[in-house]
C-alpha cells in the first residue's frame, strides 16, 4: 500500500492544500483542495473516497471530482462515511441547490456516485488493503482511519481533540509504522482549539503519552500563518516522539 499526501494544511494560500490523501491510485481519503492537483487520468482512476467528516476543507473537491470524471467511467464512485456524514452531504451539498445529486444522475439505476455507510470499528477490504474506521471527537460526527496492508499500518487521526477511545483502538495495532495526527492551533490559541475540538501542542503532548507503540509521528492540519510557531511548539513539547511536519507529496509505504 502506498499513501501519497495531496493536501495536509488547515487552510489555503499559495502551495497550501487542504486534507486529501491518495491510497495507491484508486482510493482517496478525504477530498480537500489537494485533489485539484491530480490530472484528469488520475482522477478518473479513483473508485472509492473515504470521508472523515463533512467539514468543507475535507470535502471541497468531492463534488467537482465526480462532476469532472463520472461521465468517463463505467462504475460509480463509492463514498464511504458515517451515516451522519452522508446525511450532511445529501442535505447540504448534493441537494440540487449547491450541487446536483449524483446518486440520481443519469438515473438511479446507473448513478455516478453511491454512498456506503461505515461505522466506528467497521472495516472495508479492498483487495487485501484493510481500511478500518477509528473514533474521532470533533464538532461534527467524525472518523479517523487505520490502513493495514498486513505488513504494516498507518493511522490517520482525522480532525479530533482529546480522545481516549481513539488511543484504545490504536494501542491494539501491532504493526503500526506511521501516525498522522492533527495539531491545528498553537498553544496561544488553545481556547480556540478547545472550542473547535482540535488539538494544540500542549494537548498533543498529553495525547501522545497515551500511545503504547513508537511509530513515526507526522503533524497535519496546521493553520496557515501560524504553522511555523505551532510546529516549533510541537517539536519542543513532544520531542520524545520526534514529530515531523507532514507535507504535500510525502509518500508512505506499508
Image (cartoon, grey):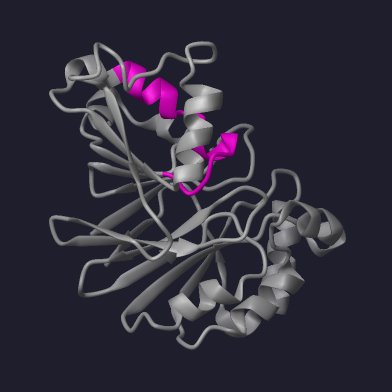
Is residue 120 something one can see in this rendering? Answer: yes
Please, is residue 162 above or below residue 206 in the view? above
Quarter of the view holding residue 63: top left
The percent coordinates of residue 169 (x first, y second) are: 45, 76
Q: How many marks?
A: 0
From the image, give the main secondary structure of the stretch colored magenta: helix
Residue 32 in view (yes/no): no
Q: Relative to residue 34, is residue 219 drawn left or right? A: right
Q: Residue at x 16, y 27 (%)?
A: 75
Residue 223 in the image: x percent, y percent?
Answer: 69, 47
Queried whether the magenta region covers residue 57, the answer comes back as yes
- Residue at screen point 57% across, 81% down: 241
Question: Is residue 182 rendered to the left or right of residue 149?
Answer: right
Provide the residue span drawn in magenta.
51-68
**As drawn, which residue projects farthest toward the bottom?**
212
Instruction: Report the side of 221 relative to 47 (left or right).
Output: right
Q: Quadrant of the N terminus?
A: bottom left
Residue 6 location (% of width, % of height): 42, 43
Task: Specify the quadrant of the image occupied by residue 138.
Answer: bottom right
Q: Position of residue 52 (x, y in %)?
A: 48, 49
Identify whether 21 is placed above or below 230. Answer: above
The residue drawn where x is 33% and y is 17% is: 68
Q: Quadrant of residue 98?
A: top right
Does 8 sit left or right of 47 as displayed?
Answer: right
**Image quadrant containing the C terminus:** bottom left
Residue in view at x 69 percent, y 62 percent: 199
Amino acid at each position: 500500500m502506498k499513501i501519497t499526501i495531496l493536501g495536509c494544511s488547515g487552510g489555503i494560500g499559495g502551495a497550501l492544500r487542504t486534507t486529501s490523501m491518495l491510497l495507491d491510485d484508486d482510493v482517496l481519503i478525504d477530498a480537500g483542495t489537494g485533489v485539484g492537483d491530480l490530472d484528469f487520468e488520475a482522477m478518473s482512476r479513483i473508485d472509492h473516497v473515504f470521508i472523515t467528516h463533512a467539514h468543507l476543507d475535507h470535502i471541497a473537491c468531492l463534488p467537482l471530482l465526480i462532476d469532472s470524471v463520472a461521465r468517463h467511467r463505467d462504475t460509480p464512485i463509492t463514498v464511504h462515511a458515517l451515516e451522519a456524514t452522508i446525511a450532511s452531504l445529501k442535505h447540504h451539498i448534493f441537494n440540487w441547490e449547491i450541487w446536483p445529486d449524483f446518486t440520481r444522475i443519469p438515473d438511479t439505476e446507473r448513478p455516478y456516485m453511491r454512498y456506503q455507510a461505515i461505522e466506528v470499528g467497521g472495516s472495508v477490504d479492498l483487495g487485501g488493503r484493510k481500511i478500518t474506521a477509528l473514533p474521532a471527537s470533533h464538532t461534527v460526527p467524525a472518523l479517523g482511519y487505520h490502513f493495514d496492508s498486513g505488513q504494516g499500518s498507518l493511522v490517520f487521526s482525522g480532525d479530533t481533540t482529546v480522545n481516549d477511545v481513539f488511543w484504545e483502538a490504536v494501542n491494539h495495532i501491532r504493526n503500526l509504522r506511521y501516525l498522522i495526527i492533527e495539531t491545528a492551533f498553537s498553544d496561544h490559541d488553545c481556547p480556540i482549539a478547545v472550542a473547535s475540538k482540535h488539538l494544540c501542542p500542549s494537548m498533543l503532548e498529553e495525547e501522545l503519552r497515551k500511545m503504547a507503540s513508537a511509530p513515526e509521528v507526522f503533524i497535519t492540519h496546521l493553520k496557515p500563518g501560524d504553522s511555523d510557531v505551532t510546529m516549533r511548539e510541537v517539536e519542543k513539547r513532544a520531542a520524545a516522539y520526534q514529530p515531523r511536519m507532514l507535507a504535500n507529496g510525502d509518500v508512505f509505504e506499508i
